[in-house]
Amino acid sequence: MKIQLLPLAAALCCAGFTLTATPIPDACLTSGIALGCQAYTFKEFSVFEAIDKTAAAGGKVIEFYPGQSYGPDQPGVHFDHNATDEMIAAVKARLEKDGIRAVNYGVVDIPKNEAGARKIFEFAKKMELYAITTESVGSIDTIEKLVKEYDIRVGFHDHPRLPKNAGYKMWDPNYLLSVVKDRDARIGSCADVGHWFHSGLDPVDCLKILQGRIISTHLKDENATFAVVPFGTGKMDMAAILDELKRQNFVGNASIEYENNWMDSVPDVAQCVGFVRGHGAK
């Protein structure tokens, strides 16, 4: 299914707005992209193991998510925006040891209540994150206020189209554009290209619609049954997706979200990293 690039999107492409938040260091780049893992790839493991496995696969950055186990020594404790300073310090120490940079956190619900939302932004600040990922469109006024205050970006994530729930619109990049177009330039899309593919859309077309508003991306390749597979072995044109991100001078994080082979996915994730590295060398 092709999506038309609306005049509004074309205008935004030429807007040239400046994002002022601290950039991701060049040392974190793989073929020009800040490439690593969404920690959900390793949801069966602790946050420390997720960091280790990201490093083992060749990733350089990591995106945390709310709800991951903190560690076997503290059963039932999760690493999220409720983490203590001691927990944060321990996680940052492991990141430094493994040479991994934390860049993002989500997908997390951001409440309209400013005190609740501020807790998430404070966590992001302590972790020195580039961005936060959410689908909390109803909280956009609060989000915009805190984006300006903390100078941290927010990307709105897309899940697949829900045929039985017409009220869910985040799958549609034109809808998302309508949500963010008049907001602070640090608010935009966490472009989940696999979910767009699952919705019957062309991910490259979707990226073009949201040009200038791509904060981050969740990268995955899928086969004909929408199972996640190593990059270059599925039905998605991963090379074209990477080329489009490069054309847009994308400066956000690209998180490999490998939702398959849960207990032994490091070799598959490494293959994804290798695909990006090899494509960039062409």
Image (tube, rainbow, N blue to C red):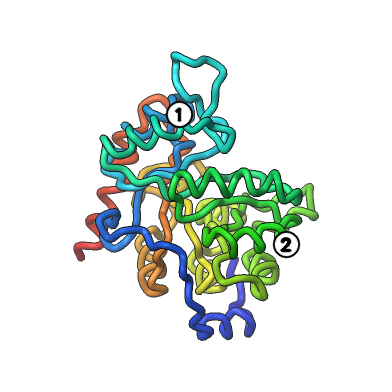
Residue 101: x and y, percent?
35, 46
State which mark lies toward you, 1 or 2. 1
Q: Is residue 200 above or below residue 2?
A: above
Amino acid tagged 2: Asp
* Residues tagged 1 and 2 counted as in contact (Cβ below 8 A): no
x then y, percent, for residue 3:
60, 71
Residue type at mark 1 is Glu
Judge left or right: residue 10 versus residue 273. Answer: right
Give the structural element (helix, strand or loop) at label 2: helix
Say left or right for 155 vs 58: right
Residue at coordinates 29% horizontally, 63% vertically from top-left?
Answer: 32
Query: Observer-nearest residue: 2 or 15?
Result: 15
Task: Please give the label number shown on residue 237.
Answer: none
Which of 21 and 210 lies nearest the eye of the viewer? 21
Q: Report the residue at 78% width, 49% height from top.
A: 165
> Is residue 18 positioned above or below 175 on the image?
below
SS for callout 1: helix
Alpha-carbon distance for marks 1 and 2?
32 Å
* Residue 27 x/y as whole percent: 25, 56
Frontmost residue, 50 versus 262: 50
Q: Quadrant of the C terminus?
A: bottom left
Q: For mark 2, what is the residue?
A: 141
The dot on residue 86 is 1
Query: Which mark is first along the chain, 2 or 1?
Result: 1
Identify which residue is drawn at 53% across, 64% down: 202
